[in-house]
Image (cartoon, helix red, strand yellow):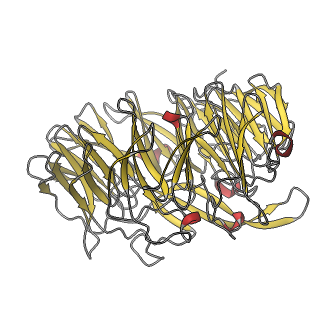
Amino acid sequence: MKKSFIMYSLLIAIVGTTPATAQFGKLLDKVKGSGGSKKSGSFATVWESEFGNKATRLAVNNHDGSYILGTDDNSASVLNGEGKLIWNGDYKNITTNKTNKCEYQYVIWKDNGGYLFLFDERKMGTDRVAVIDIASGKELWNSELYQNLLPKGTKSEDGADQGELETVKYIYELDAFLISQKASVILVKANTGEKIWETNRFKGGVGKYIYDAKKNEIIMVNFKPTALGALFAGFKNQMVKLNANNGEIIWENTFFGTVEKELVTRRAILDLWIKGDKVFMYLNGLQVYNINSGQKLWESVYENDMDGGGGGMFSNTTQKKYYRTIADPLFTDNAVYIVMLGGRDRAKYVQKHDLESGKIMWTSEKITGAFSMPNIFRTGDKVIVQVGGKVQVQEYRKEQQQSLYGGAYTSLVPYIYWDYKAQKNSLIAIDDKTGTTSWRSEKFDKRITDFIIHENKNVFVGDGDQFYCYDIASGKQIFDVKHNDAGVGKATDVIDFGETVVVLSEKGLASYNKKDGSRAYATEKIRGVDYFYDVNGNYFLRDQRNSKNILHAIDMTNGETKGSVQSKGKGGSPKYGDGLDITDDGEFIFAFKGKKVEKIKVNN
């Protein structure tokens, strides 16, 4: 799968989504610690090279590492896959409208290059935008027509908009930018800036869209962007279907709820799916529309209390918020299962709806004291529900940063990590015909990992200190293994790996055979891991404690560490953290620091 994401940049202090205090090219020969049974390897450097500038804003590679981009506020530099400089230049010299200081910029990767979108917010003049071709370094187009794309009078460093420009959306299928203005939205060709169409019947930013290639139509949902909030009154929630050729609105309707943005990633918190002749929108429950007419067919919604201001169930604040607390809807051929938030008691429960009519087929028992119910799965005549488990935390912390020019300053540093909330953790099996509880596991004291289903017969799960297997049909416990005997700390996650389950823990990994729970291996101690990535069959563990950013590559067959790298660079992928990026095949890591770029081979 090719890397098709947008990379965003705001400040030197908050580029990406994790602290930027790693050491460039520091290949860690071995993971420190003892008490495990597996040795550590080391990575090999393929080459080291330099940008033509210091990459303090963006530093990232495309899907296969054939283009490596580094930018600062005023310039960009691009290397090829061998580390050779392709081009380097100042924005004011590349652009014909003298676009210069660009605290906001992002890259869109495409085959054979991509686009570098620049936004120059001018305090005492007309804002400028420009788009540069990454492969050649030449300006594709510029404009001074688009104003108020950002909140006026808001400093970037205040952390008001950590993510994409809320008023600019790239539509991949059309190779076009959809730009929101006060009175209308405008679709322009990404490679020329030529206006394709403009409509005044859709107001606001695009929170989510679905493109229908057969009919060349777009279904999209709006939200009220910060930049436009003060510019017009009477904003209303809109879902529209329009002709992608001319912008003609085929139908429109309203929806319930407020579209929020995640604190750090700025992802719109809603989803859209097309199932047959229906459009399903997931926003505080499910809202269902006829795809041909736009008529709302049925809904099952609830009031959210995510923004409790510190006093709600989720204890969210302006600088720290919780996500991934409720499972996405589970669709089958004729039904959909939804985790619902209750009334005053804020209990949670599961509803099964007929997909066609929306009729409630059953409602499960209410589950009180459940902070999260992040996973549901249907197998045979049972619906497995996970009560409790890890939730995603996005927050900004005030930290001291070292200035490039000497001295220190305080900045808001973004963190994304997984954490646990104390609650009544357990697995519940619901009878798919009646909605009654078939069986419930014992209640786990500290936590519960995600679960893994094997051959629709067994379910595996951990509670921190133990590792369990249950028979799905009866709820009988097949085995109970003392995970704390592995010496790798409390379990935090599980990875389905062939005939084994690898348990990611606070101090390393332990692998268990699915057939009997016997331990296949335990690793050396790898402390502080809070993320894991499966990149095309290559597994990476991430440690971002204490403003570090370390990636460990692990051979899951035997638990050996292929190598580790700690970076002290800016830029990097928002996914993997400042200073680091990985190619889509998982074979190469790029580490960045200032002008320097290092290409690292994962598998020797």
Question: To which quarter of the image does residue 65 belong?
Answer: top right
Residue 552 visible to an observer of this rendering: yes
From the viewer's perspective, tell me whether residue 288 is left or right of residue 522. left
Q: Is residue 182 above or below residue 34?
A: below
Q: Residue at x 59, y 64 (%)?
A: 227
From the viewer's perspective, tell me whether residue 125 is left or right of residue 261. right
Which part of the image, by quadrant, shows the C terminus? top right
Farthest residue in the left direction? Answer: 434
Q: Residue at x 26, y 76 (%)?
A: 344
Farthest residue in the bottom direction? Answer: 311
Front in this rendered view, residue 302 or 246? 246
Residue 526 visible to an observer of this rendering: no
From the viewer's perspective, tell me whether residue 381 is left or right of residue 222. left
Front in this rendered view, residue 572 or 315? 572
- x, y (%) of residue 247? 44, 44
- x, y (%) of residue 239? 36, 54
Q: Is residue 399 above or below residue 144?
A: below
- x, y (%) of residue 142? 72, 44
Front in this rendered view, residue 572 or 189? 189
Q: Please count the marks in the image.
A: 0
Q: Residue at x 37, y 27 (%)?
A: 499
Q: Residue at x 51, y 59 (%)?
A: 262
Question: To which quarter of the image does residue 547 belong?
Answer: bottom right
- x, y (%) of residue 124? 79, 66
From the viewer's perspective, tell me whether residue 12 is left or right of residue 351. right
Q: Is residue 439 above or below residue 348?
A: above
Front in this rendered view, residue 69 or 39? 69
